[in-house]
Amino acid sequence: MNPVVAPAPAAVPWPDDAVEVGRVLDAWGIKGWIRVQPYAAQPQVLLRSRRWFLDAGDASPLVSTRRQSVDVTAAKVHGEGIVASVAQCADRTAAETLRGARVFVSRGAFPAADVDEYYWVDLIGASVVNRQGEALGIVRELLDTGAHSVLVVSADPSTGADTAAERLIPFVAAYVDQVDLAARRIVVDWGLDY
């Protein structure tokens, strides 16, 4: 009688909406757990998501595939980071092969934001116009000043404008009139000459 062999799990395709949320620092313990440095101060998406996507890049020659998905069986806050158990790592040696991998999660796995709260990843690339309808540019990135976030707005390269010029607009109610995520547009009280 021939033994029955379970089929290998199907590879999970890399999501189109993958967002980088952290990096694997090292193995943690002897049972295959990994230590992860989250990029957010409140890393709920890492704690709640049961599937992470790892991109090893050139970080580790031990990883057999550059991109892979892992099934998270447990995750918890530990110090300033997160420790997690993944089904694909049975021991410390397996966990060490993931050292340096960038951690991604599907944007669809993020918890819903509260009213008037936004994920930075949803604001990057949005067009910014003032109350007069004049285009100020595109959100290139956001800065955290401690007191509030700041939109870094660069000229839209499709207009032929100088993309090196940038505006720093405080992301506070005093200056931001409307955020339309569906239209990828932010209306601000900001002049062209500011």
Image (cartoon, rainbow, N blue to C red):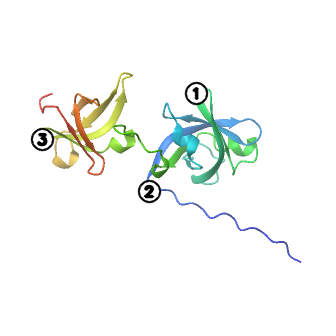
Mark 3 to mark 2 CA distance (whole Å): 32 Å
Q: Residues within 10 Å of mark 2 (few under 14, many from 20)?
A: few
Mark 3 to mark 1 CA distance (whole Å): 43 Å
Give the x, y percent position of residue 91. Answer: 76, 44
Of residues 177 and 4, the one nearer the viewer is: 177
Residue at image location 29% in from the left, 51% down from the top: 182
Image quadrant occupied by the N terminus = bottom right
User: In the figure, is residue 21 to the left or right of 4?
Assistant: left
| Earlier sequence position, callout 3 versus callout 2 | 2
Q: Identify the residue at the far top of this view.
A: 147
Is disc 3 in contact with disc 1, using a CB cutoff of under 8 Å?
A: no
Secondary structure at badge 2 equals loop
Q: Residues within 10 Å of mark 1 (few under 14, many from 20)?
A: few
Residue 171: quadrant of the picture: top left
Q: Is residue 78 visible?
A: yes
What residue sits right under mark 2 in the picture? 16
Q: Is residue 164 visible?
A: no
| Earlier sequence position, callout 3 versus callout 1 | 1
User: In the figure, is residue 5 to the left or right of 163?
Assistant: right
Task: Please say if 151 is above or below 184.
Answer: above
Secondary structure at badge 3 equals loop
Q: Identify the residue at the far right of this view.
A: 1
What residue sits right under mark 3 in the picture? 134
What residue sits right under mark 1 in the picture? 80
Residue at image location 16% in from the left, 47% down from the top: 159
Mark 1 to mark 2 CA distance (whole Å): 29 Å
| Earlier sequence position, callout 1 versus callout 2 | 2
